[in-house]
Amino acid sequence: MADNPRILLLEGNLQVNCERAVANGALSAGDRYALSLKLVYPEIEIEKFYGAEVDCALPSGDELAGYDGVVIGGSGLHAYHNEPAVTRQIDFVKTVFASGVPILGSCWGMQISVLAAGGAVEPSPLGREVGIARKVVLTEEGQQHPLFTGKAKVFDTPCIHLDEVTKIPEGAHVLASNDHSRVQALAFKYLKSDFWGVQYHPEFDLFHMARLAVMYSDIMLEGGFHNSLDEIKVHAAMMEDLYNNPSRFDLAWKLGIDKDVLDDEIRTLEISNWVEHLVLPYMATKD
């Protein structure tokens, strides 16, 4: 058995959108996830692939045997669109399911995995959930599931999504919900692989959220989340200040943010639990 877990990280965005994020002082979805993976398991080895790019060859079923887990983060694409940037990623997830490698998905990652396993994804009738997903509540199954070991029964967490899971795959279990989206987390086994996923973004920190707020200022204004670009910039600056000075009670109070978002260890528990409870045991089976 290899000494350290080897993770395949699927970047769900087109490369031009990754470059846009960098130009706005953020990171691509994949690179942001890589930081959080390294945070919870510094020795982890990560190889990133651009899943949306048609000229990027993705590993075959045989090649997947060299990985101990697959992680899929967010994307600005829509899982129900019949276009190559989307369908090739769904087809790849089907290949992963057939390989037996465990999968962790956030937002887009959960959505395309659900589609690959026979579920459905549609735009939320409530529109976008942006910034912080409030009062995410663990179901009875979620309270017992290892994905949420150490997590509070009710918590807030970073998020940004328009689409949501509307039909879960056969045998799937909803692990968390809130007033915006019934499926905030779920788990299921399909073909040979275990999948754990969340609709929100445990990999996002406040700085990344601040940069995304500015980058998506048009969406924030159209959705009525803010009334002006200046208001967005002030809000983003407050988040950045709180990120740099987490003891600023005044900013935490104004933003309505608690330690479940501010504390990296608490915020990323789902990621560390996936590594501990799925990746490392899967590695052991390959010894």
Image (cartoon, rainbow, N blue to C red):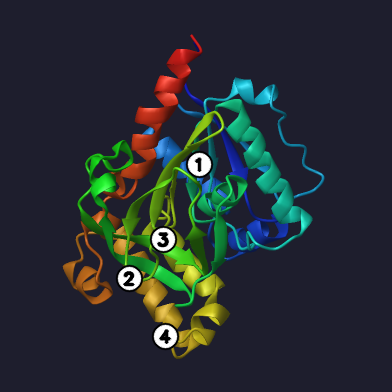
Where does label 4 land, which residue? 231
Residue extending farthest to the right is: 55
Give the amino acid type for the residue marked by disc 4 in the picture: Glu
SS of the residue at dot 2?
loop
For mark 1, give the secondary structure. helix
Q: Counting residues from the N terminus, which is met first, the one under dot 1 or under dot 2?
A: 1
Does the rendering let one see residue 124? yes
Of labels 2 and 3, the one closer to you: 2
Mark 1, mark 2: which one is toward the viewer? 2
162 left or right of 270?
right
Circle 2 residue = 179
Is 184 on the left-hand or right-hand side of 109? Answer: left
Indicate which disc, 4 or 2, sits on the residue closer to the N terminus. 2
Number of the label disc, if any, that sits on residue 207? 3
Residue 82: which quarter of the image?
bottom right
Q: Residue at x 41, y 23 (%)?
A: 280
Q: Note whether residue 202 is visible.
A: no
Which circle's residue, 2 or 3, is located before the other in the chain? 2
- Residue 34 bears which disc, if any? 1
- In the orientation shown, which residue stands out farthest toward the bottom? 227
**In the drawing, does residue 138 fall left or right of residue 50?**
left
The quadrant holding residue 187 is top left
Going by the numbered disc 3, the residue's amino acid type is: Phe
Mark 1 in CB contact with mark 3 (< 8 angstroms): no
